[in-house]
């Protein structure tokens, strides 16, 4: 799915964000899958800075920019490209340290905050369905990364087991006098590489 298709699917398409959408699409790598995208206002702050809340308990979006938020299987990207001025920030899925929200129960509008190691995105939510879809897209990507991590560990463990089994076979050959100590050591070093 392209960034533009994902934005249409989320129901947040804005003709004024055409430049941001195009720029965001250019950031998507060949091995990266777009899971969700929306057009909205976003405040990007350094994670080490304190966000100030206004009198209604909302995070201040006065310095926020209109742009595109894209969730891929690898990262959350914010891209704003207005009149040739671009701002591009990202948080890798594995670097998300927390997510929270400040939503008005009556209007279902507010903000959704994604905190990474170095960046924090405060995303303006102006439709109730957007929050659930955005949160679920990120959860889906986190689960996908866990599965990949588990599969990698299984392969590594399997490889290590098979090497250990091979070393035991060569040790048995050494003990039976079929191979020399030098041959055993050489084969063991090959397998441990």
Image (spheres, rainbow, N blue to C red):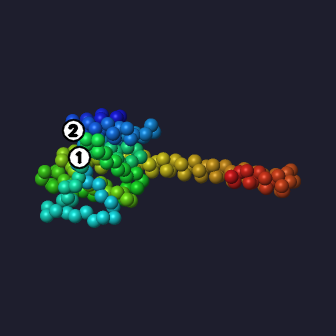
Q: Is residue 45 visible?
A: yes
Q: Which residue is mark 2?
A: 16
Instruction: Where is residue 33? Give x, y as percent.
Output: 40, 39
At x 35%, y 34%, the residue is 1
* Residue 156 falls left or right of residue 62: right
Q: What residue is rendered at 39% in x and 40% in y? A: 28
Q: Looking at this rendering, what residue extends furthest in the left direction?
A: 106
Mark 1 surroundings within 10 Å by alpha-carbon count, few (fewer than 14), some (14 through 19), many (20 or more): many
Tell me the tag on residue 66.
1
Real-space CA distance between mark 1 and mark 2, rounded to the nearest whole angstrom? 9 Å
- SS class of the residue under badge 1? strand
Residue situated in front as seen by the camera: 159 or 111: 111
Looking at the rendered structure, the secondary structure element under dot 2 is helix
Q: Residue at x 29, y 45 (%)?
A: 85
**Above or below: residue 134 compared with residue 51:** above
Q: Any mark on residue 149, and which?
A: none
Q: Quadrant of residue 80?
A: top left
Q: Is residue 137 visible?
A: no
Q: Nearer the viewer, residue 130 or 174?
A: 130
Front-most of residues 110 and 28:
28
Residue 36 screen position, x and y as percent: 32, 41
- Left or right of 158 in this view: 115: left
Are the residues tagged 1 and 2 within 8 Å (C-beta)? Answer: yes
Where residue 102 sits in the image (x, y, percent)?
Answer: 21, 57
């Amino acid at each position: 799915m392209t960034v533009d298709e994902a934005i249409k699917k989320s129901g947040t398409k804005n003709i004024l964000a055409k430049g941001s959408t195009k720029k965001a699409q250019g950031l998507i790598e060949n091995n990266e899958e777009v899971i969700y995208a929306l057009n909205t206002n976003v405040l990007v702050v350094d994670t080490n800075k304190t966000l100030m809340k206004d009198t209604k308990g909302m995070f201040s979006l006065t310095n926020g920019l209109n742009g595109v938020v894209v969730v891929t299987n690898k990262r959350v990207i914010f891209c704003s490209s207005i009149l040739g001025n671009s701002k591009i920030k990202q948080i890798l899925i594995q670097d998300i340290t927390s997510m929270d929200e400040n939503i008005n129960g009556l209007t279902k509008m507010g903000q959704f905050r994604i905190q990474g190691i170095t960046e924090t995105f405060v995303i303006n939510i102006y439709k109730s369905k957007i929050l659930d879809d955005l949160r679920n897209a990120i959860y889906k990507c986190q689960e996908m990364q866990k599965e990949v991590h588990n599969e990698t560990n299984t392969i590594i463990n399997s490889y290590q087991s098979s090497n250990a089994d091979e070393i035991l076979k060569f040790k048995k050959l050494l003990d039976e006098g079929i191979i020399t100590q030098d041959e055993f050591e050489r084969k063991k070093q090959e397998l441990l590489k």
